[in-house]
Image (tube, helix red, strand yellow):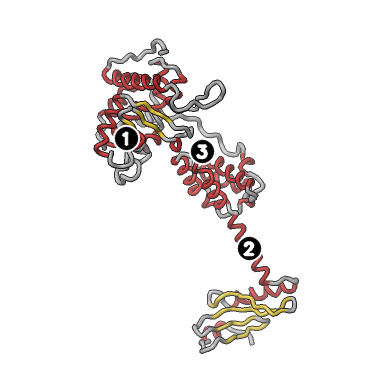
Amino acid sequence: MPLSDAAIRQTKPTEKPFKLSDGDGMFLLVNPNGSKYWRLKFRYAGKEKILALGVYPDVPLKLAREKRDEARRLLADGVDPSEFRKAIKTMKADRAANSFEVVAREWFAKYSPGWAPAHSIKIIQRLERDVFPWIGGRPISDITAPEMLACLRRIEERGTIDTAHRAKQNCGQVFRYGIATGRAEHDVCADLKGAIPPPQEGHFPAITDPTALVPVLKGIDAYPGHLVVKCALKLLPLVFVRPGELRMAEWVEFDLDRAEWCIPLERMKTKQPHIVPLSTQAIAILRELHPLTGDGRFVFPGARNQGVPMSNMATSVALKSLGFAGEMSAHGFRATARTLLDEVLGYRPELVEHQLAHAVRDPLGRAYNRTTHLPERRKMMQAWADYLDGLKAGSAEILPFQRQL
């Protein structure tokens, strides 16, 4: 006699397990602890088998019967329901193992050790924020170009077209890695050429007019904020490194007696170690800061946590508070130095490029090592610091003069 929901609810457990039949091989197994399991007894290839259909009441009577009928249809087609279920489970596991997010994280783990930490963080955060929520769980081989475009459109609609292009680039790298490892057949990002508007060309705000630079330098000297941020601001124009290289500086990298700062290759965009000769003005700033942060790891630690570097926005926010938003950026001091060292102080462009840690190569195409032109760069960095002091004092020449040899 078929079961009913009321009869199942009223059934009480006994000291031994017992079965309640519903017909066509399906029964409810009632255990002494009160648990109730749906089971289907069937024969396949002359052997009796049992297929689990779920637990009552999570699987109600109606759903259990649907599962039974589905299994019986498979049997009618000559398919073992238990083996079919195993195959489906294996397929789902394979699809999950080959999801876009799994492949992307594997790609990231393989290649990120060779990237600068700040670059790595930006990439994984971009994927986690803008890509994984939408296509991360999809098998990488099933993702279509329209799906990928819809994901990128969400980024574009925020007005961050440059981020959309960067996300497309990163996703293309993941697809190509998936192809190389046998889990994808096509890079759908390659089909999206021209589908996203080109990014707007732009540069970090920078002042290259000596006269206009004076208020910035004086504003930095008068900055009323925390000493750590003030010292970072004062060093930026003197050393003109990338802001990320400065904020993550560690005391072990500095030799104040030799007046050198050696930035390790893992923090450099070029993946080459870099030497920054320190002017007497830069040394004075570091010696002023040392009593405050010298016992820790970072030269410029965070305001709330001494064990991490200061925020990547600290110097930008400080410049904004001084009223220079849109005119001067932390990164802009590189352009300032590049222009004025060439056009005003007359130093050879290749010497300046070396100090900017740009990829300068010899006539044979080989990258110069970190000590190339070091004596000349020492003189240049001191002359640059003296020139900035002269601007603030109103005594520096602001017009181009004969190039230094």
Disc ID at residue 161: 3
Identify residue type, mark 2: Thr
* Nearer the camera: disc 1 or disc 2: 2
- Dots 3 and 1: beta carbons under 8 Å? no
Would residue 277 be visible to someone looking at this image? Answer: yes
Would residue 135 be visible to someone looking at this image? Answer: no
User: Where's residue 288, x and y in %?
Assistant: 25, 32
State left or right for residue 160 relative to residue 47. left
- Dots 1 and 2: beta carbons under 8 Å? no
At mark 2, the secondary structure is helix
Q: Residues within 10 Å of mark 3 (few under 14, many from 20)?
A: some
Q: Quadrant of residue 389?
A: top left
User: Where's residue 76, x and y in %?
Assistant: 74, 74
- Mark 2 / mark 3, whichever is N-terminal: 2
Q: Quadrant of residue 25?
A: bottom right
State left or right for residue 370 relative to residue 17. left
Disc ID at residue 318: 1
User: Which of 293 and 215 lies nearest the eye of the viewer?
Assistant: 293
Q: Is residue 395 above or below residue 233?
A: above
User: Circle 2 sits on which residue?
Assistant: 90
Q: Residue furthest front?
A: 258
At mark 3, the secondary structure is helix
Identify residue type, mark 1: Ala
